[in-house]
């Protein structure tokens, strides 16, 4: 499992050790690699998992909505991921088995992977029109690319944080590091420049809780055996 952010990983290992750039076992059949945001880091983590013996790859974590009907907390189990001009299909038989174990039923469709976050509602609407993608993240396409090159199954399990009509506060983008951990000084500077973003940050924090709770619920339904290929 390739996971970019610390709070995403905590839905799987709430009390375990989370070491950056290290493979951490989850039970007997799964392993997690905490990589930080972005496709390059995700690809590096995916290759490291394969080197450590992984026989399938999962991109797991959060996403932003592009389709207006996807509310914060919606669980995503996409069939396809668009990345660098190419659509990659997940392992559909694996996806079907996972979908049958999840309630409420997750949303499918097309996920878009970009190297940078889509921060404004206008950018999200434009990308939705141009690509037809339902949601966006920064890692899944790279994970599926590595899986395809290695000839192993690939899957994506994500939850929506920000809705399509939500613009991310600049403080939320500038105020975290590559692992999603708060950076106090940049966050404070951003809020001093834009104090009106405090309310936006609080609302985003509520949406983040919805998304993380959705991932926790999915994990409680699946567990290590339910997610295994």
Image (cartoon, helix red, strand yellow):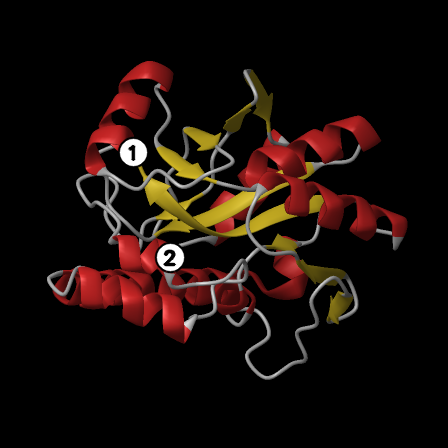
State the residue at coordinates (66%, 40%): 40
- Residue ID at (76%, 69%): 25
Q: On the rendered structure, is 45 left or right of 82?
A: right
Is residue 30 in sight in this rendering? yes
Q: Residue 12 appears at what percent x and percent y?
A: 57, 69
* Numbered badge on residue 66: 1
- In this rendering, the answer to whether 107 lies above or below 174 is above
The crowd level at tag 1 (other Cα within 10 Å; few <14, some 14-19, many 20+) is: many
**Residue 119 spot, x, y in % from top left:** 30, 42
Residue holding disc 2: 174
Q: In the picture shown, does residue 228 fall above or below 192?
A: above
Q: Give coordinates of residue 1: x percent, y percent.
A: 66, 54
Q: Is residue 91 left or right of residue 113?
A: right
Say which of 200 and 73 sits in front: 200
Separation of marks 2 and 1 at Cα, in angstroms: 22 Å
Outermost residue, bottom side: 15
Question: Does dot 2 land on a helix, a strand or a loop?
Answer: helix
Residue for point 34% across, 31% down: 134
Residue 53 horizontal/vertical position (percent): 88, 52
- Give the image quarter of residue 24: bottom right
Q: Seen in the image, is 139 located left or right of residue 229?
A: left
- Indicate the secondary structure of the residue bearing disc 1: loop
């Amino acid at each position: 499992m390739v996971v970019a952010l610390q709070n995403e990983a905590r839905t799987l290992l709430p009390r375990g050790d989370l070491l950056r750039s290290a493979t951490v076992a989850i039970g007997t059949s799964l392993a997690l690699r905490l990589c930080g945001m972005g496709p390059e880091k995700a690809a590096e983590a995916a290759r490291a998992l394969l080197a450590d013996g992984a026989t399938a790859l999962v991109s797991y974590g959060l996403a932003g909505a592009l389709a207006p009907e996807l509310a914060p907390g919606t669980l995503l189990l996409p069939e396809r991921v668009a990345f660098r001009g190419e659509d990659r299909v997940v392992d559909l038989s694996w996806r079907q088995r996972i979908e049958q174990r999840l309630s409420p039923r997750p949303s499918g469709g097309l996920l878009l992977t970009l190297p940078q976050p889509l921060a404004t509602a206008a950018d999200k609407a434009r990308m939705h029109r141009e690509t037809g993608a339902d949601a966006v993240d920064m890692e899944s396409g790279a994970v599926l690319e590595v899986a395809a090159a290695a000839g192993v199954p690939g899957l994506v399990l994500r939850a929506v944080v920000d809705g399509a009509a939500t613009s991310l506060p600049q403080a939320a983008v500038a105020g975290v590091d590559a692992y999603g951990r708060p950076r106090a000084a940049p966050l404070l500077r951003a809020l001093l420049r834009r104090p009106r973003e405090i309310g936006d940050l609080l609302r985003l924090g509520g949406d983040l809780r919805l998304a993380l709770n959705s991932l926790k619920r999915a994990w409680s339904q699946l567990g290590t055996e339910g997610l295994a290929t």
